Amino acid sequence: MTEDHKPNNEKERIRIEECGGRVEANRVDGSLAVSRAFGDKDYKTNTAGGQLEQKVIALADVTHTEVTFGSDDFAVLCCDGVFESNFENEEVIEFIKNALQTKSDLSEIAGDVCREAIERGSRDNISCVIVQFKPGMDYASLPTPLTVVPGPFAAPKNANFRKVYQLMAERGKRTVGDLLEERYDTLAAMAKRNDEEEEEFKFFSEASAPPAKGTEGRTKWFKDLFEGLSTATTAQNDQMERFEYLQQRMGLPVSLLMSLMNESNPGTE
């Protein structure tokens, strides 16, 4: 249905070069792998030309295609990181067709596409969305249970991150404790972890190591860890609100406020 906008396509290359750019290693100025994008403003600095006379433009192709509602037709939207891993458009489509023979959860199949791209060597940003042209159903009415693959618990001290992580668990009819336990076991089973994964793995045992696998109450341990983070963050936010109130309303010097807070919370820095 679509044509990839690649810098080495003849029309794209001509525009890029006329705007003072170059195509090197199939990339704009040897860096950007796409020749059309809404962002990437550094490639849109040709003040002598209009919006369509830039190294990178935001003009989209519009394609009209008839699909049969209720059929097996589907559309796939992926970022270029998927296709830069020796995973051609046709191969991605065939991969999804095969997966649909045994799976009904599109999010699981999309995740499989991303993992396949990584296995094929992609090191770029990776995302995949699959749309079927069938009557919409709420998650609760799907014929089979949803598959939830816990993502990295990468920002545990961020309240919004924790909220979304918990919502992910609830949508998949899982508990956050159950999800974190699975994530920890995934990390523990890795033969080699990168720096971010190692930092995440160490976080789980900062205070005390999780109970051994199969131990009674192990899932509750992870649940308590999650709830403890929420409590600690709430206390910090309350303290910060009091700090800002005293500073703004009473005009107390910051040094004095810090001193008072440290006296009321020994060991606080």
Image (cartoon, rainbow, N blue to C red):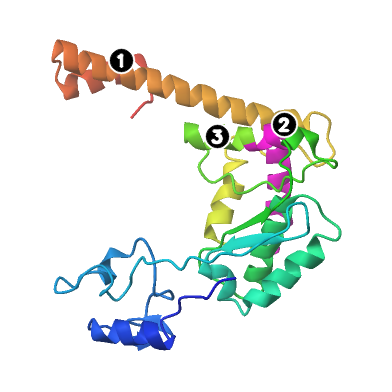
Residue 208 shown in magenta: no
User: Label 2 amino acid?
Assistant: Thr
In the depicted view, which residue is nearer to us: 124 or 153? 124
User: Label 3 amino acid?
Assistant: Arg
Can residue 159 be seen in this snapshot? yes
Q: Which residues are magenta?
A: 168-191
Residue 175 tag number? 2
As measured in the structure, the alpha-carbon distance from the residue carrying label 3 to the one carrying label 2 is: 13 Å
Which quadrant of the rendered structure holds the N terminus?
bottom right
**Mark 2 residue element:** loop
Q: Would you name the residue on which mark 1 appears?
A: 242
Instruction: Answer left or right for 38 relative to 167.
Output: left
Q: Position of residue 88 (x, y in %)?
A: 63, 78
Q: Which label lies toward us, 1 or 3? A: 3
Instruction: Answer left or right for 96 relative to 242.
Output: right
Q: Which label lies toward us, 2 or 1? A: 2
Residue 173 shown in magenta: yes
As measured in the structure, the alpha-carbon distance from the residue carrying label 2 to the one carrying label 1 is: 34 Å
User: Label 1 amino acid?
Assistant: Arg
Mark positioned earlier in the residue sequence (3 or 2): 3
In contact (CB < 8 Å): disc 3 and disc 2: no
As measured in the structure, the alpha-carbon distance from the residue carrying label 1 to the one carrying label 3 is: 24 Å
Secondary structure mostly seen in the magenta stretch: helix
Q: Position of residue 263 (x, y in %)?
A: 31, 16
Q: Quadrant of residue 41?
A: bottom left
Determine crowd level at label 2: few under 14, some 14-19, many 20+ residues with C-alpha closer than 10 A: some
Q: Residue at x 76, y 49 (%)?
A: 105
Q: Would you name the residue on which mark 3 appears?
A: 162
In the depicted view, which residue is nearer to us: 4 or 255? 4
